[in-house]
Amino acid sequence: MTQLASSGDREVEFRACCGKLRWALLDAVESLPAGTRVAKLRWGPAEIALDVEAGAGQSEPAVDAILAAVRRQLGAGAFCYAGRGTLVMRREARLRMTVSRRVAGEGKCAATYVKVLEDLARQGGQSGQAHGLRIVAAGFLGYRMIRLDLGVPPDGDGLHAELAAAQLRDALRAGLGVDPRMLSGRLAVLVEAPGDGAATVAGLRECGYTVTTGNGEAIS
């Protein structure tokens, strides 16, 4: 199925001592889910407008961008403030889609899982969405799906595609109680993509995957 997650603003407070703003921001930003955008920073006497993507694996560049905005608006003296600050964040709308393919016989091998990751990366990359693709559940349709949080590596990164495929198989083995390579059926991943994901959906369908949409349509 597909589902467009609702967006909304929320605030996270932090406390920083004089000269420690960077470390306080790192602690706050590292706790954010992937795909979150920081829209504002309230610090000292100012409210600073931002448009910074944050979340796991993006903390350092996000904090660098926030500090650069602080310096531009308040000057170097802003780093000597001490007290409470607030990050105002906007979680972007994201599409959830179930992507599946039938596996049986020779298709039950490890290479199948690598191919799923590579195809997701390739189609997401062609539509400019690969950076934000995440697998949030996986399993076999009609049997069991398990929750997980696995980022899709960039297109062309074969090493990390293999590592992510191994993580996917390990998570399925732990959740299903059996090596997934022993199972036949329709292997499925629930993928979260930024925006409406229409181009990614179309590309995956052209590759032969079944992508089930919100209205129940399933095209193989």
Image (cartoon, rainbow, N blue to C red):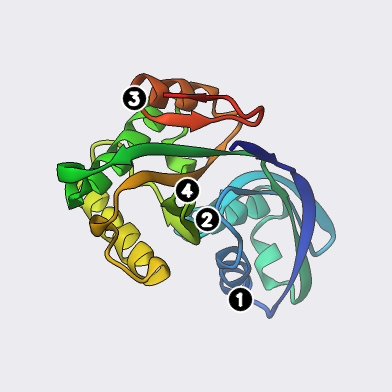
Q: Which residue is mark 2?
A: 64
Q: Which residue is mark 3?
A: 208
For disc 4, the neighbor class at 10 Å (few under 14, some 14 to 19, many from 20) is many
**Can residue 42 be seen by looking at this rendering?**
no
Dividing the picture into quarters, in which one does residue 14 lie? Answer: bottom right
The answer to whether 93 is drawn above or below residue 56 in the figure is above
The answer to whether 149 is drawn above or below residue 128 in the figure is below
Mark nearer the viewer, 4 or 2: 4
- The residues tagged by marks 1 and 2 sit, at their Cα atoms, a distance apart of 14 Å
Q: Which residue is mark 4?
A: 134
Disc with the residue nearer the chain's start (4 vs 2): 2
Tell me the amino acid under the disc marked 1.
Lys
Disc with the residue nearer the chain's start (4 vs 1): 1
Residue shown at 42% from the left, 51% from the top: 140
Q: Position of residue 131 (x, y in %)?
A: 44, 41
Q: Which residue is mark 1?
A: 20
Tell me the amino acid under the disc marked 2.
Asp
Mark nearer the viewer, 3 or 1: 3
Q: Position of residue 11 (x, y in %)?
A: 78, 60
Disc with the residue nearer the chain's start (3 vs 4): 4
Mark nearer the viewer, 4 or 1: 4
Q: Is 187 left, or right, of 94 in this rendering?
A: left
Disc with the residue nearer the chain's start (3 vs 2): 2
Foreground pick, 159 / 48: 159
